[in-house]
Every structure is written in structure tokens, then in C-alpha cells.
Image: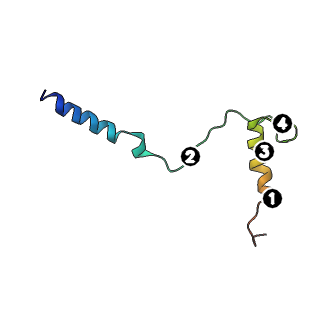
Amino acid sequence: MRKILPLRAWLAAGLILGSPFSHAASNLVFCSEGSPAGFDPAQYTTGTDYDATSVTLFNRLVQFERGGT
């Protein structure tokens, strides 16, 4: 019994210190499932194509800061 208690304490300390939350990254990295088939959202309607073109490309054409342009 006396040998098991220190072993449990070391195991608990190792689990707490080695948890992924203690070394969490500050940035979120997202990997898409594939490359877009095209860059025209009218012709290509999958989620990957929409995310790659409509949100990234075309929304930035109309977004601007007030007094910046």
C-alpha cells in the first residue's frame, strides 16, 4: 500500500502537467478538406469552393474601413 500511494501521486502529477491544455496554442489552425474546383461561386457550389472564393476573395473587395479609402 505504501508503494502504491507515491506511484499514484506521480501518475496524477504527470497527467496534470502533461495535459494539452497547459500547452494550448494561441492560434487556431484549420485545414480544409480539399482545393477548390474553381473560383466562380455561381458555377461551383460546394462548401470548399464557396469558402475559398466568396468569403475570402469577394467579401474583401467590398469591405473597407471608414475613412480608409
When the figure is inspected, residue 58 is found, relative to residue 14, above or below; the finding is below
Q: In this image, 30 relative to 63: left or right?
A: left
Mark 4 touches mark 3? (CB < 8 Å): yes
Q: Which SS class for mark 3?
A: helix
Say whether disc 4 or disc 3 marks the residue closer to the N-terminus. Answer: 4
Say whether disc 1 or disc 2 marks the residue closer to the N-terminus. Answer: 2
Task: Report how far apart the C-alphas of labels 4 and 2 lie in the structure.
Answer: 27 Å
* Amino acid type at mark 3: Thr
Label ID, residue 28: 2
Q: In this image, 6 relative to 49: left or right?
A: left
Say whether disc 4 or disc 1 marks the residue closer to the N-terminus. Answer: 4
Measured from the top left, where is residue 44 in percent x and y? 83, 36
Mark 4 touches mark 1? (CB < 8 Å): no
Disc 4: CA contacts within 10 A as few (<14), some (14-19) or many (>=20)? some
Q: Which residue in the protein does label 4 denote? A: 44
Measured from the top left, where is residue 62 in percent x and y? 81, 59
Q: Which SS class for mark 4?
A: loop
Q: Which residue in the protein does label 1 denote? A: 62
> In the rendered view of the protein, which quadrant contains the N terminus?
top left
Measured from the top left, where is residue 69 in percent x and y? 79, 69
When the figure is inspected, residue 25 is found, relative to residue 9, above or below; the finding is below
